[in-house]
Amino acid sequence: MNEVLEKIKTRRSVRRFKSDMPDKATVDRIIEAGIYAASGRNRQSAIIVAVTDKQTREKLVKINAEIMGADTDPFYNAPVILIVLSDKNVPTHVYDGSLVMGNLMLAAHAEGLGSCWIHRAKETFEAKEWKEWLASLGVEGEYEGIGHCALGYIEGDYNADLPRKQGRVFYV
């Protein structure tokens, strides 16, 4: 089977990560795959903020858990959080950012890392504090949080493959 198709079929969301930090070169290759995602009219409206700093990560854990209404680490101990945001002024921004998230997760799997799409980025980056944080990084404009890609080495094994639901494809 084609290697890309094999990776698509074998990728799983990971909810147990080791605390070991992946090397920067690997993370950079995964990010590169993200920025090569397809986008509406090739506007490339999505951006990626890579969080590897433990203090910033803990702040993200706190806000994400508050939004979720839980007292847990919503990122499952992943040492890297790739935040995908997309320009609100682009009509396809949600789709563009979603394609970036898909590429990030597939590239992580191809690089031997686990990943999981964590929600609540939209709510996080609607908050004044986090908009100011983006501005402090040099991010200008109106961005909507699309998702957080939790990334790291897998603790344990991938979950078993679940059968695909029937009746999801129709030919005309």
Image (cartoon, grey):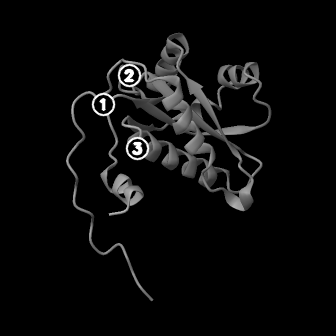
Q: Nearer the viewer, residue 69 or 138?
A: 138
Task: State the SS at label 2.
Answer: loop
Q: Given contact means CB atoms under 8 Å apart, are the residues at marks 2 and 3 in contact?
A: no
Question: Type of residue at label 3?
Answer: Ala
Q: Tell me the tag on residue 73.
A: 2
Q: Residue at x 35, y 72 (%)?
A: 168
Q: Quadrant of the C terminus?
A: bottom left
Q: Are marks 1 and 2 in contact (CB under 8 Å)?
A: no
Amino acid type assigned to the residue bearing label 2 in the image:
Asp
Q: Residue at x 79, y 36 (%)?
A: 141
Q: Position of residue 142 (x, y in %)?
A: 76, 38
- Disc 2/disc 3 C-alpha distance (Å): 25 Å
Taking 20 as reference, is 116 above or below it? below
**Residue occupied by mark 3:** 110
Q: CA distance from mark 1 to mark 2?
A: 16 Å
The type of residue carrying mark 1 is Ile
Q: Which residue is mark 1?
A: 154
Tag 2 or tag 1, which sits nearer the N-term? 2
